[in-house]
Amino acid sequence: MIGHGFMGAAHSQGWRVAPRFFDLPLAPAMQVVVGRDAAASAAAAERWGWAESATDWREVIARDDIDLIDIVTPGDTHAEIAIAALEAGKHVLCEKPLANTVEEAEAMAATAATAAERGVVSMVGFTYRRVPAVAFARRLVAEGRLGDIRQVRAEYLQDWLMDAEAPLTWRMKKEHAGSGALGDIGAHAIDLAEHITGQRVAKVSGIIETIVAERPVLAAGSGLSGTAGSDRGTVTVDDLALFTGRLTSGALASFEASRFRTGRKNALRIEISGALGALSFDLERLNELDYYDATQPADEQGFRRILVTEPGHPYVSAWWPTGHMLGYEHGFSHQVRDLVAAVADGTQPEPSFADGLHVQRVLGAVEQSSSAGGTWVTTAG
Amino acid sequence: MIGHGFMGAAHSQGWRVAPRFFDLPLAPAMQVVVGRDAAASAAAAERWGWAESATDWREVIARDDIDLIDIVTPGDTHAEIAIAALEAGKHVLCEKPLANTVEEAEAMAATAATAAERGVVSMVGFTYRRVPAVAFARRLVAEGRLGDIRQVRAEYLQDWLMDAEAPLTWRMKKEHAGSGALGDIGAHAIDLAEHITGQRVAKVSGIIETIVAERPVLAAGSGLSGTAGSDRGTVTVDDLALFTGRLTSGALASFEASRFRTGRKNALRIEISGALGALSFDLERLNELDYYDATQPADEQGFRRILVTEPGHPYVSAWWPTGHMLGYEHGFSHQVRDLVAAVADGTQPEPSFADGLHVQRVLGAVEQSSSAGGTWVTTAG
Amino acid sequence: MIGHGFMGAAHSQGWRVAPRFFDLPLAPAMQVVVGRDAAASAAAAERWGWAESATDWREVIARDDIDLIDIVTPGDTHAEIAIAALEAGKHVLCEKPLANTVEEAEAMAATAATAAERGVVSMVGFTYRRVPAVAFARRLVAEGRLGDIRQVRAEYLQDWLMDAEAPLTWRMKKEHAGSGALGDIGAHAIDLAEHITGQRVAKVSGIIETIVAERPVLAAGSGLSGTAGSDRGTVTVDDLALFTGRLTSGALASFEASRFRTGRKNALRIEISGALGALSFDLERLNELDYYDATQPADEQGFRRILVTEPGHPYVSAWWPTGHMLGYEHGFSHQVRDLVAAVADGTQPEPSFADGLHVQRVLGAVEQSSSAGGTWVTTAG
Amino acid sequence: MIGHGFMGAAHSQGWRVAPRFFDLPLAPAMQVVVGRDAAASAAAAERWGWAESATDWREVIARDDIDLIDIVTPGDTHAEIAIAALEAGKHVLCEKPLANTVEEAEAMAATAATAAERGVVSMVGFTYRRVPAVAFARRLVAEGRLGDIRQVRAEYLQDWLMDAEAPLTWRMKKEHAGSGALGDIGAHAIDLAEHITGQRVAKVSGIIETIVAERPVLAAGSGLSGTAGSDRGTVTVDDLALFTGRLTSGALASFEASRFRTGRKNALRIEISGALGALSFDLERLNELDYYDATQPADEQGFRRILVTEPGHPYVSAWWPTGHMLGYEHGFSHQVRDLVAAVADGTQPEPSFADGLHVQRVLGAVEQSSSAGGTWVTTAG
């Protein structure tokens, strides 16, 4: 595993727990954590249960006893590491967003395609696909239960930047984070909309906005938080993105990604409206899926709150009895399960680097549209 | 109309509005308001749109041009007025509870039964039966959609007495109100449970409790509120009633009536659990009914929030298009509609005085059980 | 009252009921209903309680005993009637949208401004401003409880056109309805966003879309529904509008108006995110307002479901005790109350024709932006 | 760990995960799983990550290298194992209910008290105390935020037995399970009510009921489910318990435990009503706590949905950033954390065996009251 921040903890939990609850065809060994700082990496390895630590990812990639590289570093380093790993014949799990630019993502996807011919597997970490309610939503759409999709609304709402005095972290600098709300959380909304509908966003029109443009520089700390210093610096990423997409079927999807929606903590929400029904999901209530069946008698129609904790629901039978809730991190175990299964089978898992590249293109198109005053921009490569 | 408090306003609104939205077979004329105080009665008649006012209800009952008496006085006067009116051949609508004691209610029901033979109609004002969601719930149960009823939970939760310094009003004195939370709001919970299930509560075990036993006496004011004086008096009714009932089918129903459920303003809630499904209703969201259909595939089951605003729902087609909400007072128009239809048809409407008597017997049995330390008491006459 | 469709029923209810619950400074008399068809007008007058009916609105406007004209006809007739009425010195209440085109609305607003100098009062019927929860939301914003507004989301979601075989009615023809979802329901979302924030939408970027472009022509029926014939016609209005507005303060607001959001019946929703708090409202639960107070300790913050039924809430004390719900039509009584008060005071009520004109300009700008491929269009006159 | 069913999986997950997220003063080693069947125990050890397996719990208790015994067997075996372990000087974590009878529980509590004098630690596994929202609720009550407690409602609603053809498992036989809904889930409701209020249930009045009295015998399977055979057997435990308790402060608490509440999967709900506020919790939405602050202005009061995912909330800072949800199993990690801390400190953790005994006494008193026709029965020892 390259990197060991918040995502490193989540991925480690996935690797540790998945083999206990799922019958995996291969037994993953948590071998080595890589980080720039030797002491921090060693501490992370100790804390999260990896056998060893290292500071040079190139050396780790070169090792024969390493089969899979899990990349959880900031987005600006993804391309270099992933490409090197794939070229070295290592399977790769790369945290989202795939990269910070479309160009990097294109190179990664091309490398992944070539590597795939040699049986090397790659996957991008849009973990929310593997929340049972989301996977179940996709199943219902695929089964035609919603009929033709007429409209999609997808939004990812947080408020953790609403304090104008919260300090500048790497997530607010374009050179590290690539983009702000758009790339960090909007990417999830795009991926979910595409994943559940089975369609692509073909073109977009929208705007991105920095609501608080200057912030105190970071004096100390890392990750999502830190301590403010007395100097001020410029936020170079967006706080808010509002855009409309045209899906491949022709239906419109409207998107929002915001870090300023006061009171919303982690509200990745999607509602799909179809000719025969509708679905509504909110990550703040991730064990539930609201389903509306418009084929029932008019007097009996209503949004149905399904607790997605039945054995028949995706991934659920591995865990607890009906009605026992899963949390945020379970998606990481599901990701490990599907990835390990793909490695064993020699199949390519989803979401692929090509999927990740496409999301990157949508992000890029939104930025372009915003710069061009809202005109429609295609997401074609 | 005898009386003109809060209930007088609600009944007046029913008489005024019902003819506009429903095609009534008879055209009700709002003739005379009766109250002890001449000036207050005249003002009420003016305010609520009655042609005249009077102070002697006996004189009004004696009038040939009066066909129907609507009783909205406190419970301790219901029996005398209703019996006199029925004996005078007048149709009677009597606000709930039917009476303050089982004895009075028995006399009223007997008189109503005799009067019915002469085509005189009587009805007790359990208005919540006529909330569309409640009427729809009853229809679903009657159609067998829930299968055998296994359990009922019915509760009426308010918090308007939670301030221990709120003054003593007539509703807190047994001699006027008959009982407290039990009779005032518990009666609604009982009636709803019986109405929706189509069953009776055959016996009960429970406790009633006065949480705040002393309060400042009322210096001025009336109705639900008023100003506190400096002396203190004793609350002689219950603040809280908790009881279990055995329905005629054998299923258990648990009940609560409380004026001390902090934060609950008007939460008349009922949940019916059956072998094939369940229903859940909350008066604080009175345009909604939650329905659970246990005959659907396990993965697709969930409580379905039905907006009871479709034309096919009871009473709804008379009002607004789908999705336009009704309020508290619409039940009073529905009550007028059904009462006038019954008068025109010569049929006896529901809830009858016999229904009201039965509720009274349940209330009495709860008080008896409470006095007897929780033992089961039959509600049979 | 000119016109007597669904809106005629609602306005009539307002005129009938308001004087019973509010102490009005003037006593409105429901005098005459005007409609093209004599029999239908007479029936409407009878049904809705007007003293007489007529077929020529010009004659009615000319009458000395008529002080106020209430216009509830389709939008294409508003301008002619309202201008004539105002010029004749009659007070005017005009149902929204003010007109079908910006040009008409400009003429109306100009006439209203001139008439105002002579003490003639005009008002446009954005009734939802007078839902107590909405009026309370505006109060909280005006008191600074939300701090600077950072973002607004306003949407009006319905699904009554989701059946592709529902027939073409006048609401789907541009020549009568002016626009589709945008003007019919989007106008409410715009007005609410402006009303609650106290700001204007200064420019917009967006798209309007017709999802089902051909429908069976109407064989019989009127209003919101009707029977389908065998021929097909073209829908000339939008089914869906998605747009972003820049408020005068600089904050972004995103809007949606749709008649294809499966399962949403009347979901006029608005969420305001500010530096100190947030508000969230949904017309499907119109007695509730969700309020988030970000000035409280972090551990205790949460969206608070306020039942807007307290005596201190706007309009509520006139009605029922705490916890007794109001419905859709109560807004019409509140509108009558405020209008009559303005007439008595000689002040101009809100929303003014100028407010209505501004909404019209926003609607026009959205259509322009959509035609121009999403570019930003100013709403300035 | 003695036993390895569903609870064994949950406890194992706690032991495995807690050291990764919490800084434990001691490093627990997952040593040995004990079960009657050697092969099954070995498989469980392998699956859940224990170093070895055994079939004789007495031998394991006798081992010097074992410091702590975790008991997850059915209730009828708890007493013997726990007493032996405590007498052998081992710390004990015992799954709830503490025992199947009051007598056994008394013996266990007495042994635990004696063992405590020698520094041996014991704890009973009412894990739901350690859901962050529950721990936070207790903190709010302890801080006086609710004022005097006036009323409690606690219910645990499930529906997994609603199918009358579901087979008889050990949980439906009194000799193994001790009781049915009452002991299995009602025990949680009692413990939560006592834990959050900091009070005891002093006496009870109630009824227990078997709704489906005969079921097909179990042909194969174990745990919560299994396959039905053709013979029928008698259910000897309750399906439903309804009872009222008098708390030590004098306030009334009403309880329900049911396996027949159609559509409710795991609804452990508690609502506490106090003079200054109220709290409401539902395990089906375990990351949320509804809090009502009655000290705020009347117009601004409302139940506030607090997402209990802030760093200041109990246990939360060890996990993910704000807004990232925890699941069912996290409580087991919290239990491990608190237990290990107690072992290290030499303090006695909560809930103690005395707490478990008290719950057992409440359960016994409910059964007695039910047999005695609803009379009040004290829970004093």
Image (tube, coloured by chain):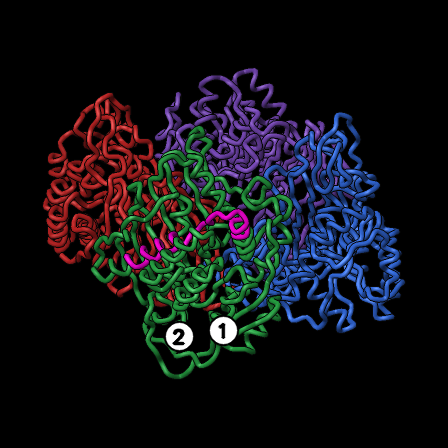
Chain colours: A blue, B red, C purple, D green
Name the front one of labels 1 and 2: 1
Q: Which residues are magenta?
A: D339-365
* Mark 2 residue element: loop
**Which residue does the image show at 68% across and 53% down from the upper left?**
A10
Where in the figure is residue B237, as x and y percent of width and height? 21, 39
**Residue D58 part of the magenta segment:** no
Residue D105 vertical position relative to residue A118 in the rendered view, above or below: above
Report whether B228 appears left or right of A178: left
Q: Is residue D352 magenta?
A: yes
Q: Specify the quadrant of the image occupied by residue C25.
A: top left
Q: Residues within 10 Å of mark 1 (few under 14, many from 20)?
A: some
| Residue beneath disc 1 | D56
* Most common secondary structure along the magenta stretch: helix
Q: Amino acid at mark 2?
A: Leu
Above or below, comparing residue A168 to residue B294 in the picture: above
Real-space Cα separation, disc 1 to disc 2, in angstroms: 28 Å
Residue at (41, 65) in percent of width and height: D78
**Residue C46 seen in this snapshot:** no
Q: Residue at x 13, y 43 (%)?
A: B79
